[in-house]
Image (cartoon, rainbow, N blue to C red):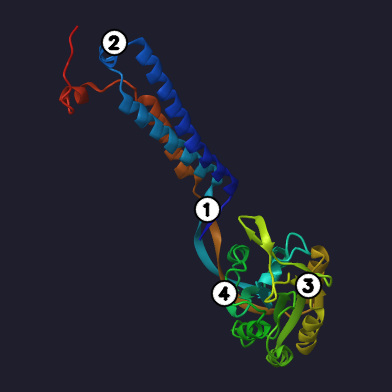
Amino acid sequence: MYQLQQPDYFYLLFALPVVVLVYLLVLFWKKRAQRSFATSSLLDILSPSQSVFKGTVKLILALLALACLSFALVNPKIGTKLETVKREGVDVVFALDVSTSMLAEDIAPNRLEKSKQLVRQIINTLAGDRIGIIGYAGSAFPQVPITTDFSSARLFLSGMNTNMVSSQGTAMTQAIALAETYYNDIEQNNRVLFLISDGEDHQGDYASIAAQANEKGIKIYTIGIGTSSGAKIPIKRDGVLQSYKTDQDNQVVITKLNKETLQEIAKAANGVYLDGTDTKELVAKVQNLLAGMDKKEFDAKQFSDFKDQFQWFLAGALLFLLLDVLLLERKTKWINNLNLFNQQKTDL
C-alpha cells in the first residue's frame, strides 16, 4: 500500500519535454551559427575536443535529476505495517443509475455528475462504516465490493459513466437484488442501500423486490436526481454538443424525475425518499439517518505505519546533478584514441 503526499508536484514532469525542445532549438541555433562561420572540417580542427555526444548525455542526466526531484516533492509513502483494527459502523451500499437519461443537464453539470458528487460527499462524512458501489442501467453490475478502503471507492466512482452498460433502461430491481449479495456479514443488523436515480424507464415489480430486501434487514433510501419539468438528453462528442436524443418517431426525448416510483420503493423497504438537489442538505440528512443506527463492531485490516520514500529520489536527483557537473563536454582522450568510427585526422 502506498500514499502520495503531494501529487500536484507531478506537474513538474511536463517540464521535461520543454527542456528537450529548448535544447534542440539551442543546438540548431549553434549549428547554424557555426556553419556561417566555418566549414565542418575547419570546425573540427579549431575545436577538436568538442563532443556532441557528451552534450546529449548531460541533457539526459539533467532530465533524470528533474524527474527524481519531482518524485521527491510528491513524497510517496509505503505502508510497512498491516494491523487489524476494531471499527464500528454499518454496511452502506450505493446503487448509482448510469442510464443515458442521467446525462440530462436540468441539474448542473448533469444528473450523473451530480449523483457522483453526492456519493463522494457522503463517503467523506463516513468513519467506521463499510461501503460498496453498484452501477445499473439496463442491467446491474458490481463496481466496488463491500470495503473499508474509501480511497479506492472514490477512484472507481469517478470512472463511472453511461458507457459502462450497453443495454439501456433503469433496472432498479436488478440493482436491489445485486445489493442483497453485498451484505456478507450475517451479524450486521443495519444494512443500508442508497438507490440514486431519476426513476425513469424502470423495469419489473420494484415494490415487491424492495419489500423482500427489507425482510432481509436492508433499508432502502432513494435519492431523486432531476427536476419534474425535465430536460433534453444531449449527445456530445469530445464535450461538443452534436444533437439531442430522439425516440422512434424522431421526437426529442424529454426526461423527467419520476419521484413517485422512488417514493414507493423507499416506502416498501422501510426507508425514505430524499431530494438530491441540495448537496449540503442531503449529506446532513444522511448523516442523521446513519447516526441513529446501531453500529456493529468488526475487524478491518489497514496499514497503520507509512514511511517516507522521498529521500531515495532526492539522493538520485543529487547524484545525477553531480554527474552532470563533473561530466565535461570535451572528448575523452582514451575513447578518442580508440577511433571507433575510423575518422581520418586532418592536418593543416
The residue singled out by tag 1 in the image is 77
Name the N-terminal-most of marks 2 and 4: 2
Name the N-terminal-most of marks 4 and 3: 4
Q: Amino acid at mark 3?
A: Val
| Neighbours of disc 4 within 10 Å: few (<14), some (14-19), many (20+) | few
Q: Secondary structure at mark 4?
A: loop
Asked if one can make out residue 6 in the rendered structure from this viewpoint, the answer is no
The image quarter in which residue 299 lies: bottom right
For marks 2 and 4, give the one nearer the viewer: 4
| Neighbours of disc 3 within 10 Å: few (<14), some (14-19), many (20+) | some
- Residue lying at 47% horizontally and 40% vertically, measured from the top left: 67
The extreme front residue here reads 249
Name the N-terminal-most of marks 1 and 4: 1
Q: Amino acid at mark 4?
A: Ser
Tags 2 and 1 touching, CB below 8 Å:
no
The residue singled out by tag 4 in the image is 166
| Neighbours of disc 2 within 10 Å: few (<14), some (14-19), many (20+) | few
Name the N-terminal-most of marks 1 and 3: 1
For marks 1 and 3, give the one nearer the viewer: 3
The residue singled out by tag 2 in the image is 46
Q: CA distance from mark 4 to mark 3?
A: 32 Å
In the rendering, at what x and y percent does residue 257 appear?
A: 79, 74
